[in-house]
Image (cartoon, helix red, strand yellow):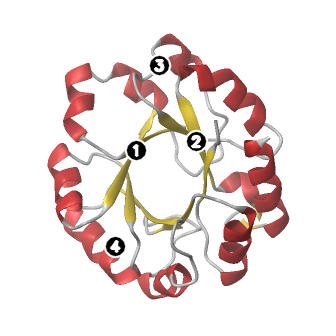
Amino acid sequence: MRTWVKICGLSTPETVDAAVEAGVDAVGFVFAPGSPRTIDPATARELTARVPAGVETVGVFRGQDVETVLELARASSVSTVQLHGDETPGDVARAHEAGLRVIRAVGAAAYAAEPEEARGAFREDALLLDAVAPGAGATFDSAPLLAAPPARDWLLAGGLTPANVAGLLAGLRPQGAVGVDVSSGVESSRGVKSVELIRAFVVAARA
């Protein structure tokens, strides 16, 4: 099974080009306020223009109202929105109506506590299970997933690095993990992506 890979928090032409050349499936641009990786929509639009067809462009949002999400998505020309926060099934539906794909990001423990009917109501295109504090680089806690794995394919995030991604995938793939999303694990310093680490991560994830 080929691992789906997304590099998130990109902000420069060099790192976008490196991710694309390494063979990623998606690149992410952060619009969540307060992150050291946050960029403005004009910069994101310049970067998405460098991304070839077949590579997904993802805008990452946290706790923002759906109208703000849609406005920033239009202004930046991303194809997909990734929602971290208290979004409702109605918000996901609004994004779909606007022609966007939706990745719903939720903490693994919070997902394990969701009633099955609540999970099904979102109808997101992809499910991403993240650390409690997205973007913090905290090590992923696999215990909730091993206890109650999703009944669908999902994406793994939280504390991933070139050194640990292969081992974590090996342990969780039988539980449905089909892809990975990394940000801080490919940085030379907080908020600064490393071309070398991006390349190393993709190789490790696909090994």
Residue 158 falls left or right of residue 59: right
Q: Which residue is mark 1?
A: 126
Q: Which residue is mark 2?
A: 179
Most foreground residue, 193 or 99: 99
Looking at the rendering, which quadrant does residue 68 occupy?
bottom left
Regarding residue 157, the answer to whether it shows in the image is: no
Question: Pointers 1 and 3 in contact (CB under 8 A)?
Answer: no
> Which dot marks residue 73?
4
Most foreground residue, 21 or 48: 21
Most foreground residue, 178 or 60: 178
Of label 2 and label 4, which has the lower sequence position?
Answer: 4
Secondary structure type for disc 4: helix
Q: Position of residue 158 (x, y in %)?
A: 60, 41
Quote the CA–CA distance across marks 3 and 2: 15 Å
Residue 149 higher or lower than 62, as above or below? above
Of label 1 and label 3, which has the lower sequence position?
Answer: 1
Quote the CA–CA distance across marks 4 and 1: 17 Å
Question: Pointers 2 and 1 in contact (CB under 8 A)?
Answer: yes
Residue 180 falls left or right of residue 108: right
Quote the CA–CA distance across marks 1 and 3: 15 Å
Quadrant in the picture for the N terminus: top right
Q: Which residue is painted at 51% across and 18% down in the image?
A: 144
Q: Residues within 10 Å of mark 3 (few under 14, many from 20)?
A: many
Q: Residues within 10 Å of mark 2 (few under 14, many from 20)?
A: many
Q: Which residue is mark 3?
A: 149
Of label 3 and label 4, which has the lower sequence position?
Answer: 4
